[in-house]
Amino acid sequence: MLPAVIQYLNRVGTRAYCVPVVNIFDRNVKRLQKERAARRDDVQLYDYIKDEVGFRLSDRIFDVQRQFKNAVDLGAGRGYVTNHVLSESVENLTVVDMCSTMLTQIKGTPGLNYSTRQMDEEKFDFEQESLDLVVSSLTLHWINDLPACFKAINRALRPDGVFMGAMFGGETLYELRSSFHLAEQERKGGFSPHISPFTQIRDVGMLLNRSNFTMLTIDTDEIVVGYPSMFELMEDLKGMAENNAAFNRPLRFSKDVLMAAAAIYRDMYGKNDGVTATFQVIYFVGWKPCPSQPKPAERGSADVSFKDLATVVGPKDKKQ
């Protein structure tokens, strides 16, 4: 399920149909959650997932054998990508986040030329064809209108520019979600959306294609973390500023539902020393089209059929 109703244009002949955007997330609430998390004295204790994903994403930047002149770290938080980016990979880096306090806590790497800019990620605003790289780590799942955001990023990139990102996928926190659903079904005869909706991997590729990105690379990874109980998990989510920010979220938990959910969580997903929580991370890379990019061969240009593939293997290869 997408984190917002997709706004897109389907053309059938001369007729067009448009689905209006429905805001699911309260962006002001999310900004306040991030501010509160950033001002905690122990804020660094909750960086373990975001710092790990940011490191893996920065490593993918390093894998591209070029130096990007102008780059943007979108939704940088406390610098989970910026703190690992090397100056050999990025010449000038603009660090963007909606939380001003988090921007002041970014350290960067030695020799990295970076500047900070407070901006709501939903209102991505850079000059057309002014950037060579846009990277975003674990923030896009809070965007209401992902298609508009992706298209704005595509406009800001130069031809052959690259968009790299990581976002939580649909299997994230399925243990916590199912525990609350079962507890509320038992206690109240229905359930409320305690866990925000996440994007499915199939939707990411579709969105990138519709936003004019090409040569897509998409893969997923799962990070499984152990906790003493469900309550420590919920406290850590709050410390990460990953608590629910949906408009229709319940404002409080009833004690009986909370205790029932904790018992169900322990019974269904418990280990000897506690419980586990799964974070599914979707990584993607998309390139803005450019004439210099490799093109697929024309349809029908192959000179070997798949049914004759066995005859192409030589006798030496057959022995192996």
Image (cartoon, grey):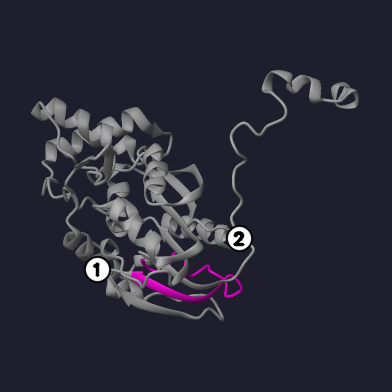
Distance from disc 1 to disc 2, alpha carbons, whole Å, reads: 34 Å
Where the N terminus falls, by quadrant? top left
What secondary structure is marked by label 2? loop
Determine the residue positioned at 21% across, 28% down. 182
Quick one: label 1 or label 2, which is nearer the N terminus? 1
Magenta region, residue range: 77-96
| Type of the residue with mark 2 | Val
Q: Position of residue 7 (x, y in %)?
A: 24, 47
Of residues 269 and 171, which is closer to you in this image? Answer: 171
Residue at image point 28% right, 48% down: 234
> Can you say which quadrant of the picture contains the C terminus?
top right
Residue 73's disc is none
The residue singled out by tag 1 in the image is 35
Residue tagged 2: 64
User: Is 112 displayed left or right of 15 in the figure?
Assistant: right
**Does residue 156 appear left or right of residue 92 in this picture?**
left
